[in-house]
Amino acid sequence: MNKHSLSLSKKLLIAAAISFLFLAIVVRVIHPDAKELDFVITATGNYEYSSITAEYGTEDIVEITSYYKEGERYHIIFDGISPGETSAKIFAVHSENPEVIDSSFIDIVHTKTGILFTDKTFIFNGYQYLFISVTLVFIAFSILTLVHFIQTKIRHYFSYESILSLGLFMYFALQSCALLPFAIESLIDPWEHYGVIVFLCTNYVLSIVALISTPVLLIFSLFISSSNIRLIQKEGKKPSNLLGILISLMLFGGLLLIFIIMKNSTMSLEFTPGDTANILTRNIIASLFVYFECNLLATFILCRIAGRHKPKLDKDHIIILGCGIKDDGTLYPLLQGRADAAIAFYKKQLEKTGKAARFVPSGGQGPDECIPEGEAIKNYLIKQGIPADRILPETRSENTYQNMKYSKEIIDKDNPDSKMIFSTTNYHVYRSGILASMVGMNADGLGSKTKWYFWPNALIREFIGMVVNGRRIHIFLIVLLVVQTIILGNLQWLLQAIL
């Protein structure tokens, strides 16, 4: 975990602590109001009531202390007498015809701390303020991760941390969007919505987000699966060429599992131990699913943007990353595309600004290669009319990290203040930029075009690389997010214990 990842984790921990304190203050503020229960009934036919009384299943638990009319509604105020549970049958006598009596039923719980709430619908005075506060916490986390993403992009254009912070922003923003309409409605008219609906929203929000994304995932899965089939037809049944199909199966397996568990879930707050286990399992699976779904989407967005990026025409050196050559020392189409993109950039810059960059073709000699890749690229550049004195080949590297490291050594000797660019295949730009940053190179990226069916599989590799590279912070975040989902999934029990 690098220092910037630590910074992100510290920010999230501090934000979590502040959120907990904020919610504790909200609970404390609404606690006095929650010692009364404001129960609302609507007058039948807009009649006036001359009196409102109640009969109780268990006496001396609660009592009606007052009532008042507001529009067509009557607010009935209950006060507690002693802790316990009771049912109340409410009788509302019509003022114009005392023989007409409207009735309704309510189950009330009076806690040891003096709080009153309806047993089945979980309404208590101030529940709407708690719900909007929970929603505001999600919005705050969305803003925090978005700001961190912007700061990271300014500091390092290419980084796994950018993918992570963008993925977290989407994770929290999706939940905020799912909760916000219900929160606003409960705030505008709290008597129109049962508390059970509000708290079931917090319970099911991640599962709902996961299922809503099904159409997008279906299109995405069909695309990457079809690209894998095409890739297999062209390049054979290598394990790496099956990544897209495997990810598609995992995505739909996760969705199916969430759907099955949701189908067997209770839609009330009267949970049995089995219901609680069901909720915990569903919330944990949904949390992991949405977390990795958002990170996969973030990887796709940033890699796609990087692959289409147009660098400034002010470069001193152009690195060309090798990727294998033919038996006769000529370039495969993939590597030739990288070289052609570099040449096109060189010519455009020379034409527009008069500045002639130097080329650094980079790549060592593999066991089955007749010459180093750097030399093979140099030969191709010369055939394309590039002067030999503008080419500084690097011939020791065995992987992309070494491409960057050894190329930087050559460039630093030639011009320590060089403005650099590397040319690679479009899907490879973002990860190459990350490796360039790791060796202290502040380089821009240039992506060459490739066949459409290479993109999805390459995207999956970049995503796996992001997960593996930041595995420690991913474990930390998963634990933090699982704790969050467990708390939300059992919010009503926590409130009953606190209140």
Image: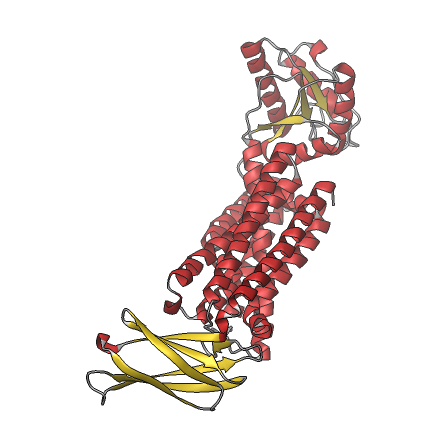
Q: Is residue 330 above or below residue 429?
A: above
Quarter residue 356 falls in = top right
Residue, x 66% and y 44% (percent of image)?
466
Residue 195 in the figure: left or right of residue 486: left
In the rendering, at what x and y percent does residue 337 appear? Answer: 60, 26
> In the depicted view, which residue is nearer to us: 337 or 304?
304
In the rendering, at what x and y percent does residue 142 appear? Answer: 55, 48
Q: Is residue 139 above or below residue 156?
A: below
The C terminus: image quadrant: bottom right
Residue, x 73% and y 22% (percent of image)?
374
Residue 256 in the figure: left or right of residue 194: right
| Residue 78 seen | yes
> In the depicted view, which residue is nearer to us: 267 or 66?
66
Looking at the image, the residue that sits furthest to the left is: 96
> In the depicted view, which residue is nearer to us: 465 or 450?
465
Q: Is residue 105 above or below residue 345?
A: below
Residue 98 in the figure: left or right of residue 125: left
Residue, x 66% and y 57% (percent of image)?
480
In the rendering, at what x and y percent does residue 110 appear? Answer: 52, 81
Quarter residue 318 falls in = top right
The N terminus: image quadrant: top right
In the rendering, at what x and y percent does residue 383 appear? Answer: 65, 13
